[in-house]
Every structure is written in C-alpha cells, then in structure tokens.
Image: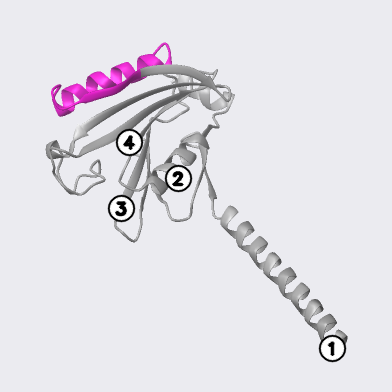
Amino acid sequence: MRLLQNQFSIRYSLLMTLLLMLFASWGCSSASEDTVYTNPDFGIRLEKPENWSLVFTERNGSIVLETENEEKESARIGIYGFACVPSQYENSKNVLEAELERSNAAYDLESVTIIQEPIQEQINGYQVATAIISLPTIALQENSSINQFGLQDPDVDQIIEMIAIRDNENNSIIVYAYQGRSDKLNTEAEKIIDSIELTCTTDQYLNFVQK
C-alpha cells in the first residue's frame, strides 16, 4: 500500500513538473509574439504583435499598422513624416496645434470635438505632445480607413489620439491612433506607440539640411 502511495506521489510530482514547464513555454511564446520592425530610410524602430499588419509607403512617407479580431473589431495606427527630415516647428506642441487646425478644416469645425488640448512632456528622452479628438461616425464613410466602427451613427464617436514625437536633433514624426471597440486592440496600439524609437543618424540629418 505504501509502495502504491509512493508511486502515485512520484507520478503526481512528475505531472505537475511537466504542467509547469508547459505553462512556462506558453508564457515564453506569448511574450515573444512581438516582432521588431526597423526602417533606416524612415528613421524609425518599433515593436508590434504578429497580428498587426504593417505597410510602408515611401511616396508619402507613411507607415500604417492595422489589425482586426474575430469579431471584426479593429484598430489602426498611422505614422507620418520621415523622421530624419528636420521639423519646421519649434516644438512638438506646435506640431499638434497645426494638426488640429488642419483637422478642423478637413472635417468641419462643428464635427471635431477636442477632448484633450495638446500637452507636451519629456518621455524616455523624447519631447512628446499628445492631443485627443473625436469625430462623429455620421460624418465619416462606413468604409473609411479612419472609421474603426464600420458604421455611421450620430451617437458613436471615432476617438483619435494624436502624438508628436521629437528627439534632441529635431527629428520628428506624428502618430495617429484610431481607437475601436476592442480594449485589447486599443491596448496593443498603445504598446506599439510606446515602443517607437527614432533612429536617425547624424549623417542623415546633415544630408537633409544640406539639400
């Protein structure tokens, strides 16, 4: 009887060890799902989950990341402006103020609601300004890339977070984050934006200045 108990105890211990190893491997695989994207010409590095697509368009200097889950919920990120082109604005806050004026002209002043005026702060060595606006989906086409809800409803707003990122060498980009219904996808979008690094070299900066 005692022998059977010992054998059961050994088997139970082995089973628990195997389960712990399996859970650990799952944890490692899920933690390694992010892929690193670097673009020396654009001057950017970021990390993104594998379920996010990424398209770089050299013609207009844009990077677009998109994803969609099984429930057809989506989120979108647009990154604009070659980072290695010196900014014409004094600081990141001025960039967003200009973007807000452009948005008012593009979507009609009455349609744009400013949830958060541009706020500027230092984050990880970067000068970062953030503003948040909302647009009623009734003012957007259902199939518009901006509209993450896929409908036109006066009671449903499309939230857009605008982020201007600038380093000490005057290299800068602007990021648009289009939030959807999924908290998970919106959180993934935030993590992608937080991972952004500007990778411009001194030579790239001088080349643009001299042109």
Amino acid type, residue under disc 4 in the picture: Asn
Is residue 8 toward the left or the right of residue 154 in the image? right
Give the distance between the C-alpha atoms of the residues marked 1 and 4, in whole angstroms.
Answer: 78 Å
Q: What is the secondary structure assignment of the residue under circle 4?
A: loop
Between disc 1 and disc 3, the foreground one is: 1
Q: Tag 2's secondary structure?
A: helix
Residue indicated by mark 2 = 188
Q: Nearer the viewer, residue 31 or 87?
A: 31
Distance Cα–Cα, label 1 vs label 3? 58 Å
| Element assignment for label 1 | loop
The answer to whether marks 2 and 3 mark residues whose Cβ atoms lie closer than 8 Å is no
- Placement of 68 over or under 174, stated as above or below: below
> What is the span of residues highlighted in magenta in the rendered image?
89-117
- Taking the image as drawn, is residue 159 in sight? yes
**What amino acid type should be assigned to the residue bearing mark 1?**
Met
Q: Position of residue 151 (x, y in %)?
A: 16, 47
Q: Which mark is residue 152?
A: none
Foreground mark, 1 or 4, reads 1
Label number found at residue 1 = 1
C-alpha gap between disc 2 and disc 3 = 13 Å
10 lies left or right of 70: right
Image location (x, y in percent) of residue 19:
68, 69
Assess disc 2: are there few (<14), some (14-19) or many (≥20) residues with their C-alpha within 10 Å of its C-alpha. Answer: some
Which callout, 2 or 1, points to the residue nearer the camera?
Answer: 1
**How packed is label 3: few (under 14 Cα within 10 Å), some, or many (20 or more)?**
some
Mark 2–mark 1 Cα distance, whole angstroms, equals 55 Å
State the residue at coordinates (15%, 21%).
109
* Image coloring type: one colour
Tell me residue 27's x, y (percent). 62, 58
Indicate whether 200 appears above or below 40.
above
